[in-house]
Image (cartoon, coloured by chain):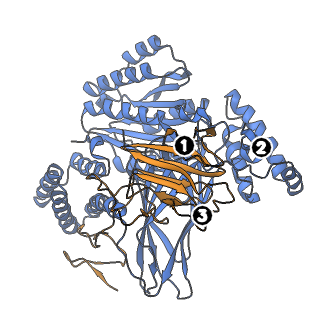
Chain colours: A blue, B orange
Amino acid sequence: MSTSYLDNYYARLGVSRGSASEDIRSAYYQAARRLHPDTNDDPTATELFLQIQEAYETLSDDKKRADYDKTLPVDIDPPPDILINPLYSRAIIPQIDNQQLVYILLDLMALPNKTDETEAINPPLNIGLVLDNSTSMAGARMDMVKSTATQIVRGLRPMDSLAIITFNDRADVIVPATKDLDQKIVESRISQLKTGGGTEILQGLEAGFNEVGRYLNPSTVNHIILVTDGRTYGDEEGCQQLATNAAKKGITINGLGIGSEWNDNFMDKLVSTTGGNSVYAANPEDIKHFLTKQFSRLSETYADQVAMEIDTGPDVELRYTFRLSPDPGPLTQDSPINIGTIPLGPSLTILMEFVVKSIPPDVDTLTLAEGKLSLEIPTRPIPATSSRFSFTRPTSANPDLEPPPQALIKAMSRLSLYRLQEQARRELEAGEIEKATTRMQNLATQLLMSGEPSLAHTVMLELKQIEGGNSISEEAEKRIKYGTRALLLPVDERSTP
Amino acid sequence: MINVCPNCHHQELEGALFCSECGTKLVEQSGLSTAAIPASDSRAVEARKSAAPPPSLPEMTGEAVASLHIVRTGQILPLVGRDEFTIGRVSEGQSILPDIDLTPYEAYSQGVSRLHATIKIQGDDLMIIDLGSSNGTRINNNKVTPHEEREIQHGDVIALGQFKIQALLRQDEP
């Protein structure tokens, strides 16, 4: 039996045998924060906590650690959990005085441990569904939310935990976080949902956070799904603070915005803090599509809470990060960057843009960035080992500049359309109308050339509005933003109008 | 070096791939095709018998259906250019050479035979056949019968003697 690498102190903390003591300490604190009996009601969490405690007592003491090491077989480190595969825009970095850009297309792929059968199954879910039931949700939107929620409840397995919260000016816990829900009772509660009042997102998020927190466990996929059609006022900072706490605790927030009034910039910032994603439902019919897709995605999670602690090299700046797949969306630039979940099948891919300020002539290897990737593998009883990475390239005074790899160019050609849209929107907000209209014209041209006539048409219609002295409609802004973002999806997954 | 957009004449930083002003592509596309699993740091496994041209591949190719991940070193070998590969190591006086030579990875000390196994790509599937090697082949710790075809799934760990490689198959979106 190959349990040797499962049952040792290093494995319990998710560190490798050669780990430095500060890595061991940070792994311990990270695990302890989530599993401490004071904050976590789950009985298995307490047991895990005690095991981790025992491991740390030995490994944090150099003498005890050395004695313990002598009792271990030579090869105890488990095989890697994920494959970290960077693709660089330049094989060799030219040594020039000017600033230059270097791109990395980073692929993170699941490497399930096939000798252990539990990893082939889908992990249990711990989801808080936070639903806006303000007045504007009345009618088709609420009907669609109800029917989708009912469908989701029917699809749950006994091991999944679900909480349903509604919010307007205040939050109501309609279904507290429960495993093995009584479907009839839940369905009747869903059918009785009423609408009324305003939109105070913080109320809903707080209730959702508390409910998900009750079953919080590294062996479940812990997510809040926020569904709203409105704009929250005055509590944006509170929401952002809550997202920061959620990220620390290991809870991801995903957002679904309905119609034209919700604040997509606020939502993107909120969800990207936790590594989540936001989607736009132009019509009530899209609600069902997105929510059911979200649930099936989450149940196919291999690794959750993938986070990247990153330090850029000297004279290197990380200027832009974007998740290309599975759910396209912006990421934060500040370390640690929460980058989302790695599905069992397709890889998690992100794009990073680095500005290299200058390369001194004596530097023959340029370090773009280095750091550590940490993640949770919910189906595994022990913490996943975090992996160190280092993105470096050789430099040369006179390199043969080869064209960048095709996969990177392909990704950037789509992403550059999204970025034109982002830039145009920033310019509009700053009142730089002329710049913005030129850019939108360029965007429309590029969209036409990429075979996206209907999206190009939307851009041109808006252009006319702006040139006629009107402001751009919120609906068009969202259609263009989520439309260009959807271009990053594989063709069969695009569904936005 | 200057990097000026041919379309709008906006000046971009060296290394920019697309014009930030108008979206025009600023770089030549590489003529080489890239594996779906990006593998910049590893060399593609070239078809060794150069006399026989590689079999022509269907339309969307250039993208490797499968790759082998050498667990110990983290290197990735995309399987491109043909649909059958022998794996082994090279030693002096050997007349038949394997398509994939694991000699540089200390294959000898890990018990890899000279012609250890064959890997076949059949459509989207990957198969392995042990060629009667001395130390045997195991898939996820289960020994395989020599000369018998076995299917490999994405993520399977294949041990050639003690030498571990992991199969990576292209995972299309469902």
Residue A197 is left or right of residue A206, and the answer is: left
Mark 1 sits on what residue?
A: B156
Marks 3, 1: nearer the viewer: 3
Tag 3 near tag 1, CB within 8 Å:
no
Q: CA distance from mark 3 to mark 2?
A: 33 Å
Where's residue B77, x and y in %?
A: 49, 58
Where's residue B85, x and y in %?
A: 46, 54
Mark 3 sits on what residue?
A: B103
Crowding at label 2, few (<14), some or many (≥20) Cα neighbours within 10 Å? some
In this view, A137 is above or below A267: above
Residue B36 is left or right of residue A366, and the answer is: left
| Amino acid type, residue under disc 2 in the picture | Asn
Q: Which mark sits nearer the N-terminus, 3 or 1?
A: 3
Mark 2 sits on what residue?
A: A8
Q: CA distance from mark 3 to mark 1?
A: 22 Å
Tag 3, which secondary structure?
helix
Marks 1, 2: nearer the viewer: 1
Question: What residue is drawn where x is 53% and y is 55%?
Answer: B87
In this view, A433 is above or below B171: below
